[in-house]
Image: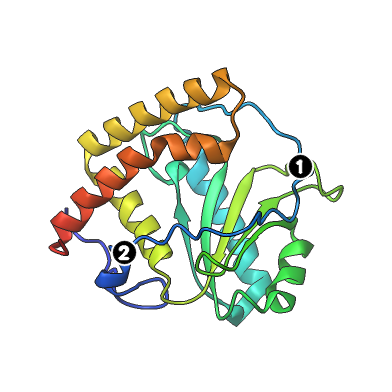
């Protein structure tokens, strides 16, 4: 796979030995907003408008955070042309210290991002959703904003996975099939998005092994 980035460099990078070591972050319930309504999981065909939606959101985020933002990337399925996805833009944001929520949470709230998950045991991950002022209604475009600290292996993995799917049709097709099968199975028995994600995990890990071999890390 031709490398677009040096995945070990910069605040969005990490050392290869850390990238190939998964930490599933077992811990207590981390939902801050468990009251949010559940919805049927739906995949749609890739929409080229997602790229522009990401760009607008990223510009807003960077404008309110200034130097607190060390890096930002469009990740997840909406960042991969040709891949079916839930119509929710996933963004990885790197800040100096995710634990210092008082620094970045109010500016993000001012542009419609509501903190919904806090995961100290998993790379100090925080997730914000793009919400209307009522704090319950999704704001267009729908977005999950994932906040991590510098040199986080998960951010590097997100970028690697995205770039692999962009450049490798076989892995992209395999992942899309896994997504379609998983969403059908999850919806049939009323599972949550987290359970839907777990159904894809085996295929995701196999694709990561392909990536790590291509990079010469295993």
- Give residue 3's quadrant in the image: bottom left
- Give residue 202's quadrant in the image: top left
Q: How many marks?
A: 2
Q: Position of residue 36 (x, y in %)?
A: 76, 42
- Give residue 99's quadrant in the image: bottom right
Q: Kindly tell me whether residue 12 is visible in this rendering.
A: yes
Q: Is residue 32 above or below residue 66?
A: above
Q: Residue at x 63, y 65 (%)?
A: 61
Q: Position of residue 205 (x, y in %)?
A: 30, 47
- Measured in 3D between alpha carbons, the distance from the residue under mark 1 to the one under mark 2, in whole angstroms, is 32 Å
Label 1's element?
A: loop
- Specify how the rendered protein is coloured: rainbow
Q: Position of residue 190 (x, y in %)?
A: 62, 24
- In this picture, residue 193 sits left or right of residue 171: right
- Please tell me the numbered disc located at residue 21: 2
Q: Nearer the viewer, residue 218 or 77?
A: 218
Most extreme residue toward the right, as rendered?
134
Q: Earlier in the sequence, mark 1 or mark 2?
A: 2
Q: Residue at x 58, y 79 (%)?
A: 97
Q: Position of residue 216 (x, y in %)?
A: 12, 63
- In this picture, residue 15 sits left or right of residue 110: left
Q: Residue at x 44, y 27 (%)?
A: 182
Q: Nearer the viewer, residue 33 or 155?
A: 33
> Crowdedness of circle 1 by 10 Å Cα count: few (<14), some, many (20+)?
few
> Crowdedness of circle 2 by 10 Å Cα count: few (<14), some, many (20+)?
few
- Asked if disc 1 and disc 2 are in contact, CB closer than 8 Å, the reply is no
Q: Nearer the viewer, residue 189 or 50?
A: 189
Label 2's element?
A: loop
Q: Is residue 206 above or below residue 63?
A: above
From the image, which quarter does the C terminus lie in? bottom left
- Please tell me the numbered disc located at residue 36: 1
């Amino acid at each position: 796979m031709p490398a677009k980035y040096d995945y070990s460099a910069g605040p969005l990078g990490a050392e290869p030995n850390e990238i190939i070591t998964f930490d599933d972050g077992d811990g207590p319930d981390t939902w801050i907003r468990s009251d949010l309504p559940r919805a049927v999981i739906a995949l749609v065909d890739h929409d080229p408008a997602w790229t522009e939606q990401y760009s607008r959101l990223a510009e807003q985020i960077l404008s309110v955070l200034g130097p607190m933002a060390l890096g930002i990337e469009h990740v997840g399925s909406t960042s991969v042309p040709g891949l079916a996805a839930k119509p929710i833009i996933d963004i990885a944001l790197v800040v100096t210290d995710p634990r210092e929520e008082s620094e970045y949470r109010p500016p993000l709230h001012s542009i419609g991002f509501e903190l919904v998950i806090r995961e100290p045991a998993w790379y100090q991950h925080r997730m914000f959703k793009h919400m209307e002022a009522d704090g319950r209604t999704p704001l267009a475009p729908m977005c999950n904003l994932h906040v991590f600290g510098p040199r986080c292996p998960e951010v590097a993995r997100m970028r690697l996975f995205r770039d692999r799917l962009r450049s490798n049709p076989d892995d992209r097709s395999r992942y899309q099939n896994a997504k379609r099968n998983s969403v059908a199975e999850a919806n049939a028995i009323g599972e949550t998005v987290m359970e839907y994600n777990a159904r894809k995990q085996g295929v995701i890990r196999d694709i990561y092994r392909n990536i790590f071999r291509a990079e010469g890390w295993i």
